[in-house]
Amino acid sequence: MEKCSVLVSSCDKYRDAWLPFFTLLGKYWKDRPYPLYLNTESEKVTEVAGVPVTSISCPYKNCSWSRRLIHALKQIKSEYVIFMLEDFFIMSPVDQKEIEHCISLMEAHPKIANINFGYGKYLENGEYIDKIYAKRSRNTSYYLNAQAALWRRKTLIKLLSPYESAWQFELYGSERAKLYNLDFIIKKDDILIFDYRTNETYGFGINKGMWMKGNVELFKKEGITDVPFENLGFYDPEKVTSQIGVKPKRTSREKIMRFFFAGEDLPRWEIKDQLKLLFSHPGTFAREKVHAIRK
């Protein structure tokens, strides 16, 4: 059984991002020893930009983001998986030795579910794993998130609900992770294992289904040509700013979930853990006796 794999989560709509993503991955992670998988809806590929990749398409119709991800994870057999999105364009060499160190930390600490490779808040006062890595604060926003990270594959499956979007997974999955009393780890310094940026300030990646304008310069610098930017168009922050104050449309289920799983913008209600789990993860509620979840 392979120790670790790399899973890039994507969809057919964002196929134009595959060429730059895998070009940069091949350039900046030449010593990658792990098999590489691409999660798609229906597209099938065996290599992109000269990089061998195994695509895993979704067998279901109208498949949600989470259900596609669950299906892909179940096709992979490694104990650990490095999870990434298709617009995390790597900008400098990946630190393979540090990834191996992260795997050794997870092997030594069974409660660690995830080591996040991005920025984030961490606990001080002794809540650390070693000199470089510390536990994430459970009070921080998006305690669980979809940034590049090393995961226990089976734990990631356990935290996913097949009815959720990526945004809902980050919101409700964070609460599920707290119920299971799992540890999420963050690197304490600013030296990233994967140097990628998806913030509009830097202008890389895809935001709200559109290209960030900075990608034009980035791809030109890296010698990446023939990216059809016109298919998705470019993100315009001024248009988004003009829509601030417009309440988004939400389903009745989402309204209930937001009511119980309050974020920073909503008051947090003190309700029983059983009720939280019932609303957020009915499958788990049915399979396990909830009173035994907290240890």
Image (spheres, rainbow, N blue to C red):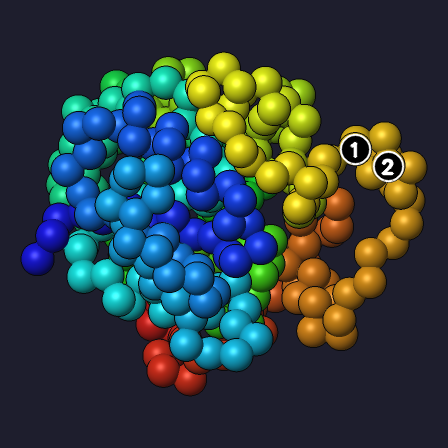
Name the disc covering residue 95, or none.
none
Q: Is residue 213 left or right of residue 178?
A: right
Query: From this viewpoint, which residue is outermost toward the front?
Result: 226
Q: Callout 1, which amino acid? A: Asp
Question: Camera-side residue: 194 or 137?
Answer: 194
Relative to 70, residue 11 above or below: above
Give the amino acid type for the residue marked by disc 2 in the picture. Answer: Lys
**Left or right: where 57 falls relative to 30:** right
How far is disc 1 from disc 2 in space, using C-alphas? 6 Å
- Residue 88 horizontal/vertical position (percent): 47, 35
Name the residue at 20% across, 34% down. Answer: 32
> What is the tally of numbered marks visible in this picture?
2
Specify the label residue 239 is tagged with. Answer: 2
Q: Residues within 10 Å of mark 2 (few under 14, many from 20)?
A: few
Asked whether 282 or 15 is in front, the reply is 15
Is there any visible trace of residue 138 in the rendered image?
A: no
Quarter where residue 109 is shown:
top left
Q: Give how far across and how far down residue 27 sits, in percent.
A: 31, 25
State the residue at coordinates (42%, 16%).
190
Quarter of the C terminus within the rendering: bottom left
Percent position (x, y) of residue 157? 35, 64
Using a 10 Å C-alpha cutoff, classify the residue at mark 1 as few (fewer than 14 neighbours), some (14 to 19) or many (20 or more). Answer: some
Question: Mark 1–mark 2 contact, CB under 8 Å?
Answer: yes
Q: Residue at coordinates 73% horizontally, 35% vertically from top-left?
A: 235
Q: Quadrant of residue 227?
A: top right
Left or right: 52 as drawn, with respect to 233: left
Q: Residue at x 47, y 53 (%)?
A: 10
Q: Name the quarter where the N terminus is drawn.
A: bottom left
Viewer can see residue 229:
yes
Name the outermost residue toward the left. 1
The residue where tag 1 is placed is 236
Secondary structure at badge 1 equals loop
